[in-house]
Image (tube, rainbow, N blue to C red):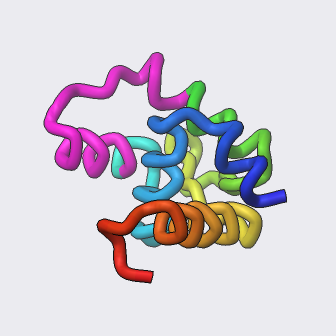
Amino acid sequence: MGMNEMFGLTGFQRDLLVVASGLEKPSGQQIKDQIQATIGTEVKHGRLYPNLDTLVERGLLEKGQLDRRTNFYQVTEKGALTIQEQLEWMQSQSKALPA
């Protein structure tokens, strides 16, 4: 299940999932700020939120409400498993990464 899920995501979606997993119930804006700082380029709302919604629809993130204007995202167990399986797959395929 996890490996198929991982390969069904875009690179950007996988990056969003990893960033969200490193923050405590981040808002979309916090995820956006972190990913922009990491990749060094602006991420438009029109790219960010549809991709976050895809992660929610696939059960990798849960979406909740902090207040009337702000949502938060939290990695689900399925999302955490997907990240772990991606890491294990990368380690098994690359001689550059420690096993």
Say if 45 sits above or below 12 in the image.
Answer: above
Provide residue 60's location: percent of width, then percent of height.
Answer: 70, 54
- Tell which residue pokes out farthest to the top in this image: 46
Residue 75 seen in the current view = no
Say if 8 sits above or below 19 in the image.
Answer: above
Residue 99 seen in the current view = yes
**Side of 96 relative to 66 (left or right):** left
Provide residue 84's location: percent of width, then percent of height.
Answer: 59, 71
Residue drawn at x 18%, y 29% as measured from the top left:
41
Q: Nearer the viewer, residue 46 or 58?
A: 58
Res 56 quadrant in image = top right
**Side of 96 relative to 65 (left or right):** left
Provide residue 17's location: percent of width, then percent of height.
Answer: 53, 53
Q: Nearer the viewer, residue 7 or 52?
A: 7
Q: Which residues are magenta?
A: 31-49
- Tell which residue pokes out farthest to the right in this image: 1
Most common secondary structure along the magenta stretch: helix
Q: Nearer the viewer, residue 98 or 51?
A: 98
What is the count of numbered marks? 0
Residue drawn at x 68%, y 34% as measured from the top left:
54
33 is within the stretch colored magenta: yes
